[in-house]
Amino acid sequence: MSLRARINSPEENGHRGEDGHLVASYRAKLLEEIDLAEMSSLAAAERRARLERVLGHIISREGPVLSTVERSQLIRRVVDEALGLGILEPLLEDASITEIMVNGPDAIFVERGGRVEQLPLRFASHDQLMQTIERIVSTVNRRVDESNPMVDARLPSGERVNVIIPPLSLTGATLTIRRFPRSFTLREMIGLGSLDEPILYLLAGLVQARFNVIVSGATGTGKTTLLNALSGLIPDGERIITIEDSAELQLQQSHVVRLEARPPNVEGQGRITIRDLVRNSLRMRPDRIVVGEVRGGESLDMLQAMSTGHDGSLATVHANSAEDALMRLQTLASMSDVEVPFVALHDQINSAVDVIIQLTRFADGMRRVTEIALLDSHGGEPYRLATVARFNAQPMTPDGRIHGAFQHFPLTRRTADRLFMANQPVPQAFGVAQTTHQLALREAR
């Protein structure tokens, strides 16, 4: 079997060891012939080119005799080991891959097009996997060892990285890399099947009329992607403060201040939480606040900001339905260090939240807006949600796809009046509910 075939078929255990030895041998020879001080002064692209050139001379001088393709493959592997992230390097360069999941040295999975697949790639050993992990976390001045077995960080290039190692992980060192998402517009999301044109017009009107919007969904449903698309509808002249645990939003407006939480250092000091940043943002004269995800006591500060002059703010929350999102916000707000009765939190949510957009990831990998609900209750009233858009899914077809249609319902009079006062039209597909009977009929459906 050729070198290239052995590299592309790493399940061949005997060849795998042989290839690993060959790569390690040439990596050692490469390090003997380069000037590390000189290399450190070069830019990343120049450093890689220099290593490839030196390694090419070594192979020409010492062998083995290889075809052009095999030679390029060997050079790539050795340089990736010496400079990059080894077998993960090509995966990070593949734009179609949105997530890389390493479950120990022998199991590497990726997500493409919303579907997870296992790749025929393996690390040569647990030690090689740990070396790769240590190289990743060192770029953000973090360390991973038995005393600090979990790391959650963002790479300088934007990828979100999570590491957990034994003894906490029983399957070996586990590495998850979420790719920095490409920015989509709402118009592009129509092409992806995530929403339809009437929903686009409705969302545009709600954002520009300064409704407070909560984007709800489970992990991986596209909350950040939709939040980014919605934020693109904010008028350019407004001062926007974005607050995130790991910076992913890519706002294009000219007056944007980006804030990112900071984990504690290796001594356990210096942590800055989302809540700290939300509180600080209120002193920065924001027109709108955009919170990547509320997951704790900062929910209370966010709700207070929404109901005290910062209309048009946006946030995401983990929840499986619009109703669950309200209860989740109430629970998270109760986690604040301020003792607030549940009744008062209920009133705060009724006052602050205007719209909930629910996202769902279906079994075929498609991410869609499955519900848009208006919060139409006041003060101490029980939560009353008026659904104005819903995706009705059909059973999965033999080709593994899930199809369906978006359904639209009349807007509440209160919502229509706010849109009118902001000079925003009510999309024709929705209309306006004239009576409470119409709202009751929609819930019956």
Image (cartoon, helix red, strand yellow):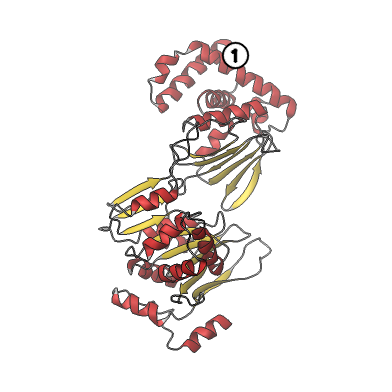
Quadrant in the picture for the N terminus? top right
Q: Residues within 10 Å of mark 1 (few under 14, many from 20)?
A: few
Name the residue rendered at 41%, 59% in the picture: 302
253 displayed left or right of 79: left
**Tag count in the figure?**
1
| Camera-side residue of 5 and 189 | 189
In percent of width and height, residue 387 lies at 50, 75
Q: In the picture, residue 365 is in which quadrant?
A: bottom right
Q: Is residue 6 above or below residue 365?
A: above
| Camera-side residue of 404 and 139 | 139
In percent of width and height, residue 130 lies at 61, 29
Residue 303 seen in the current view = yes
Instruction: Say what secondary structure mark 1 lies in.
Output: loop
Name the residue rendered at 33%, 67% in the picture: 208
Quadrant in the picture for the C terminus? bottom right
| Camera-side residue of 12 and 69 | 12
Residue 1 seen in the current view = no
| Camera-side residue of 291 and 159 | 291
205 displayed left or right of 322: left
In the image as oriented, which residue stretches furthest toward the left? 237
Name the residue rendered at 62%, 62% in the picture: 401
**Disc 1 target residue:** 63
Q: Amino acid at mark 1?
A: Gly
Name the residue rendered at 53%, 23% in the picture: 82
In percent of width and height, residue 241 lies at 34, 53
In percent of width and height, residue 315 lies at 44, 59
